[in-house]
Image: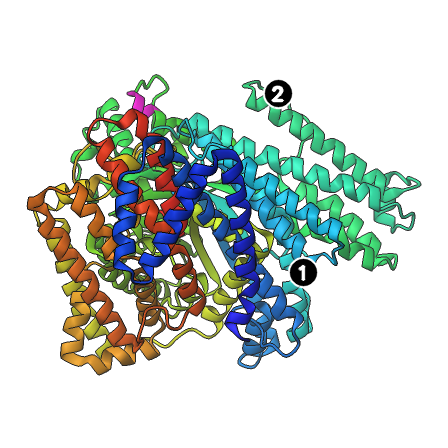
């Protein structure tokens, strides 16, 4: 299919939306601002085409922009980039539909059709069916502060996408075309008058509501459609349908549960968020049951349904009316608990099975009466939703740093006169923990009065005991380093009276922790009490963000790969099923990238039908904000996990491993040599990027720093990457890669090229680095240096820009490409379309940063915040 021909509708959408934005600008901001924006746009396009005079004129014009023009110009370019994003997302859906309509087109790579056709030729039907039934994929939505767009604007953007879809699907008369046009105009005008910047930092509860909105507005309807498509493909290839309780994909959440470094997430917050999740679930189920009551007017019923309905004239309606009333009672019970009351025990729904039972009774009765076609409609969709979402939509993980548990145990042992837990060695800690876990007597005295931080830890475990297993998922321990870190959480669960223990998941993040993960887990699995506790299943989380910030992207990627290999081998030796939980971010430097390629590049044996992965910030909106995009991403997860499980890649050759070890060592030394060992680097980073100003954005409940120090080590991975993304140097994704590749090419270039051709891990890594380098622009970073960086530090910027160029040369030498993104022409064109609109925002940001840093913060901070948002939209990425 010709890419340029199929992209013509995208170009038309962008032209239409840009024209409507221009009309809005002319009407609302005035003729003079409109002409300024048009002139900036013209000069920027000519500058991108290589016109040096236009580039100089653009810089002069934006440097001299009067204060009253800054905000409307920034908003105009920011809003255009957001509209371009909407058009591109809609076009992805359009292309998918075009492929499905065209009988001569090969199915999309990674689609259910393409993957099942290929897999059915490699494995027998019984094995394929069982593999689908055994799938356990959990997408964990997190509230990391990377979604810069306000929820109210995201809703408007989704409405614009719906109108574009409506415009495509109409067999329109002129009046209908005009109505869509006017509706688009109204939405764009409303967006123009909507403040882009949150004026208050969101609370964790607000973030949780945002996550629930994604379920309510998109995934609630997409899940049944996705499962219907999956069922059709499974039946077509295996002759067997999916079971009624099939839930290959479920959803978890860290919103309201992730308290690591976030003092705003308290036990009270976690309790409230769990109740909010349950409230929204009940609301959605009540709506669906109401629709079923309208639909199921049938009188035919089997004996079981007749008994359940009391021999009612319309038995389905009677049973479902009883269900609806119980759902309403459940909602009232939750309302009372949210209000701080203690409602009396009532016949409310506490567990999903209680709701499933009457629905299955109706389903089986319809099947028995010959009305199976009715059963397979809305009723089956609701049963499948219940399997996926349960009664809480998303189970909340609790995350806390290991040191906080140790502090709590230290306070307890001191209170009991046992000495300081902090001062005990690992063997003494383990002996104490196992002894207390095996004891039936309580450890914590009733009169215990700890300090506020320890009390908060203990209160969190009390909430876990109150909420129960339907509301909560895993307990994740960040900075886990030894077996006692895991056993400590088990003991605190016991002491709080948690009846159904949460599974405890150690998170290994830094390079040292990743390298020690196998030894830590081996010691843990050799403890008899713990082996009995886990019942043959262990989950381990590996962190991409902090490992990348610690050692650089290449070194971290290789360390993560090897850690997975070692953990897989350990699990096999110990006879334990392993689930790996991937803490991936949105950006390449934090483990982000195309889903399908990322999963298929994992080590052999590391998936085995089970996968947990975080979805963070703006990635949630990008992947699940629109129904068509959401369905495509659910399919990609499904097919990638199936393929990685049934047809895993071969293990890398020994000479590839040897070369990767050398590349990783060189990349690590280069990265740390700059970030940790170059004294002037921190000052350069502070001057050359908007790191300080990003901290003023009210885009998340978490503080930007773990501790109030100046070093990069205390800065969270998200603002670290966000800052470099704004200047388009994108340093965390490539620093060290160029030096490593140069060394590898000099030693054994043919082996490097062979690795790229034949090893999915190495190919996926280099493709992602190439994509980053294509989106970046060292010349833009030079603008920041020229205005913002003191003269003595500018040499460091020149050095980094030189490294950027050499890294690109090295990547192209290995991939054999003449230009970046040669294999991804759609992305290549997307970058080219955006550049003339992002460039002016970068130039204005440089000007604003200079003015703000010289005493004009109050007046110019709002347009600077909008500018940060606009560049993030143009780069399709923050952190």
Residue drawn at x 53%, y 40% as measured from the top left: 24
Q: Is 534 displayed left or right of 785 in the figure?
A: right
Residue 228 numbered mark, or none: 1
Q: Which of these two is toward me, 120 or 574?
A: 120
Give the foreground label among 1 and 2.
Answer: 1
Magenta stretch encompasses residue 491:
no
| Quadrant in the picture for residue 55 | bottom left
Q: Residue at x 51, y 70 (%)?
A: 4
Q: Quadrant of residue 225?
A: bottom right
Position of residue 113 relative to residue 567, above or below, is below
Residue topped by disc 2 = 343
Quarter occupied by residue 666: bottom left
Look at the image and give the residue range highlighted in magenta.
Answer: 451-455
Label 2 neighbour load within 10 Å: few <14, some 14-19, many 20+: few
Q: Quick check: can you spot residue 387? A: no
Residue 72, x across and y down, in percent: 42, 36
Q: Main secondary structure of the magenta part?
A: helix
Q: Secondary structure at mark 1?
A: helix
Indicate the secondary structure of the residue bearing disc 2.
loop
Tell me the quarter of the image containing the N terminus: bottom right
The image position of residue 268, as x and y in percent, is 45, 25
- Count of numbered labels shown in the rendering: 2
Sequence-wise, which precedes: disc 1 or disc 2? 1
The colour style of the image is rainbow
Who is closer to the viewer here, 44 or 198?
A: 44
Task: Answer few, some or many: residues within 10 Å of disc 1's Cα (few below 14, many 20 plus, some between 14 and 19).
Answer: some
């Amino acid at each position: 299919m010709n890419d340029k021909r199929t992209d013509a509708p995208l170009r038309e959408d962008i032209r239409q939306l840009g024209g409507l934005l221009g009309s809005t600008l002319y009407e609302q901001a005035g003729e003079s601002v409109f002409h300024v924006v048009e002139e900036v746009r013209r000069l920027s396009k000519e500058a991108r085409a290589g016109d040096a005079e236009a580039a100089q004129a653009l810089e002069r014009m934006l440097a001299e922009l009067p204060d009253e023009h800054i905000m409307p110009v920034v908003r105009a370019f920011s809003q255009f980039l957001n509209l371009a994003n909407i058009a591109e997302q809609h076009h992805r859906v359009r292309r998918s539909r075009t492929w499905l309509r065209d009988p001569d087109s090969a199915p999309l790579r990674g689609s259910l059709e393409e993957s099942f056709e290929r897999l059915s030729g490699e494995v027998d039907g019984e094995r394929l069916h069982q593999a689908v039934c055994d799938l356990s994929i959990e997408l964990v939505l997190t509230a990391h502060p990377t979604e810069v767009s306000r929820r109210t604007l995201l809703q408007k953007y989704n409405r614009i996408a719906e109108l574009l879809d409506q415009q495509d699907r109409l067999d329109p008369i002129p009046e209908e075309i005009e109505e869509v046009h006017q509706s688009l105009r109204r939405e764009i005008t409303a967006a123009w008058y909507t403040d882009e910047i949150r004026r208050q930092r969101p609370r964790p509860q607000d973030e949780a509501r945002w996550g629930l909105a994604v379920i309510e507005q998109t995934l609630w309807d997409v899940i049944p459609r996705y499962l219907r498509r999956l069922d059709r493909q499974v039946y077509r290839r295996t002759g067997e349908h999916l079971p009624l309780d099939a839930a290959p994909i479920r959803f978890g959440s860290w919103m309201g549960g992730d308290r690591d470094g976030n003092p705003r997430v308290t036990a009270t917050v976690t309790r409230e968020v769990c109740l909010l999740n349950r409230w929204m679930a009940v609301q959605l189920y009540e709506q669906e049951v109401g629709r079923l009551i309208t639909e199921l007017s049938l009188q035919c019923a089997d004996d079981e349904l007749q008994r359940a309905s009391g021999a009612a004239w319309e038995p389905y309606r009677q049973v479902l009316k009883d269900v609806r009333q119980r759902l309403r009672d459940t909602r009232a019970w939750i309302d009372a608990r949210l209000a701080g009351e203690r409602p009396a025990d009532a016949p409310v729904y506490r567990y999903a099975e209680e709701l499933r039972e009457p629905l299955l009774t109706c389903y089986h009765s319809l099947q028995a009466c010959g009305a199976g076609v009715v059963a397979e409609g809305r009723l089956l969709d609701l049963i499948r939703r219940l399997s996926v979402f349960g009664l809480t939509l998303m189970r909340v993980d609790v995350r806390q740093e290991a040191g906080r548990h140790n502090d709590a145990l230290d306070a307890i042992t001191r209170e009991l006169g046992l000495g300081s837990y902090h001062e005990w060695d690992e063997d003494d800690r383990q002996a104490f923990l196992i002894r207390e876990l095996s004891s039936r007597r309580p450890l914590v005295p009733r009169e215990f009065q700890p300090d506020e931080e320890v009390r908060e830890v203990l209160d969190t475990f009390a909430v876990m005991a109150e909420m129960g297993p339907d509301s909560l998922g895993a307990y994740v321990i960040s900075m886990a380093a030894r077996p006692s870190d895991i056993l400590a959480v088990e003991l605190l669960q016991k002491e709080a009276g948690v009846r159904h223990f949460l599974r405890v998941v150690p998170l290994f993040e830094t390079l040292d922790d990743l390298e020690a993960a196998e030894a830590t887990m081996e010691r843990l699995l050799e403890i008899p009490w713990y082996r009995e506790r886990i019942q043959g299943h262990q989950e381990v989380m590996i962190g991409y963000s902090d490992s990348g910030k610690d050692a650089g992207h290449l070194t971290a990627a290789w360390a993560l790969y090897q850690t997975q290999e070692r953990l897989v081998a350990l699990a096999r030796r110990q006879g334990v099923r392993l689930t790996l939980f991937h803490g991936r971010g949105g950006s390449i430097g934090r483990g982000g990238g195309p889903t399908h390629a990322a999963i298929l590049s994992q080590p052999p044996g590391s998936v085995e039908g089970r996968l947990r992965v975080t979805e963070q910030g703006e990635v949630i909106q990008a992947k699940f904000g629109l129904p068509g995009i959401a369905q495509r991403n659910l399919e990609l997860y499904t097919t990638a996990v199936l393929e990685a499980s049934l047809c895993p890649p071969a293990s890398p050759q020994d000479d590839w491993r040897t070369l990767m070890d050398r590349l990783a060592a060189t990349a690590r030394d280069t990265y740390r040599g700059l970030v940790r060992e170059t004294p002037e680097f921190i000052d350069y980073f502070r001057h050359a990027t908007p790191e300080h100003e990003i901290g003023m954005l009210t885009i998340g409940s978490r503080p930007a720093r773990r501790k109030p120090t100046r070093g990069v080590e205390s800065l969270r991975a998200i603002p670290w990457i966000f800052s470099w993304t704004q200047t388009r140097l994108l340093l965390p994704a490539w620093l060290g890669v160029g030096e490593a590749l140069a060394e590898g090419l000099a030693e054994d270039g043919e082996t490097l090229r062979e690795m790229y051709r034949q090893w999915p891990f190495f190919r996926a890594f280099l493709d992602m680095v190439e994509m980053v380098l294509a989106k970046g622009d060292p010349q833009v970073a030079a603008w920041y240096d020229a205005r913002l960086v003191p003269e003595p530090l500018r040499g460091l910027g020149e050095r980094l820009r030189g490294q950027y160029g050499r890294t690109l040369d090295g990547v192209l030498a290995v991939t054999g490409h003449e230009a970046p993104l040669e294999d991804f022409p759609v992305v290549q064109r997307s970058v080219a379309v955006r550049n003339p609109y992002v460039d002016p925002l970068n130039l204005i940001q440089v000007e604003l940063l200079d003015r703000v840093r010289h005493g004009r913060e109050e007046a110019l901070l709002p347009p600077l915040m909008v500018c940060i948002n606009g560049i993030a939209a143009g780069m399709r990425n923050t952190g």
